[in-house]
Image: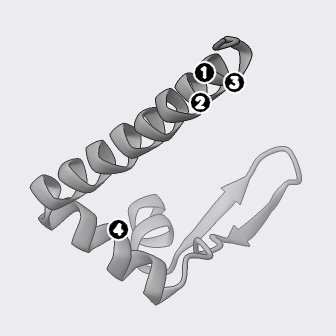
Amino acid sequence: MIYTNEDILNMKYNERLNKIQIKKEKRTSKKILKIINKIRANKFITVAGSLFLIFSIINFYLIYSIIKLIQTVNFM
């Protein structure tokens, strides 16, 4: 009976409250699930995009640092 209640009917006995409760479904929308499934299916594209983003941020930081360094040096 426990197997039937938990798996088929989505019910569970709560000992603390001393009553049967219906299991709640997770609140994830279909769009989020589609995005997650595409990320899992296309791991190479995801890794390549992530690396591109990381290296772009590093590149902008290095350019900013060089420009600040050049501004502080006084050329005569």
Type of residue at label 2? Answer: Ile
Name the mark on residue 53. none
Q: Circles 3 and 2: CB distance less than 8 Å?
A: yes
Does residue 21 lie above or below 54 as drawn?
below
Kindly identify which residue carries mark 1: 70
Single out the mark in the foreground, 3 or 2. 3
How far from the left and from the top, in percent, is residue 59? 41, 36
Residue contact at pointers 1 and 3, CB within 8 angstroms: yes
User: Three-letter amino acid code at disc 3?
Assistant: Gln
Label 4 vs label 2: CA separation? 40 Å
Q: Quadrant of residue 1?
A: bottom left
The residue lying at 23 percent from left, 73 percent from top is 38
Q: Against 24, is 65 above or below?
A: above
Dot 3 crowding, Cα within 10 Å, few <14, some 14–19, many 20+: few
Q: Which mark is residue 71?
A: 3
Reading the image, the residue beneath label 2 is 67
**Residue drawn 44% across the image and 33% down it:** 58
Which residue is at the far right? 17
| Lateral position of residue 31 relative to residue 35, left or right | right
In this view, the residue in front, 69 or 4, is: 69
Q: Give 69 or 2, whichever is nearer the viewer.
A: 69
The residue carrying pointer 2 sits among few (fewer than 14), some (14 to 19) or many (20 or more) residues within 10 Å by Cα, namely few
Q: How far apart are marks 3 and 2 (CA)?
A: 6 Å
| x and y, in percent, of residue 12 in the image | 62, 62
Who's the residue at 21% across and 60% down the image?
40
Q: Are marks 3 and 4 in contact (CB under 8 Å)?
A: no
Mark 3 / mark 4, whichever is N-terminal = 4
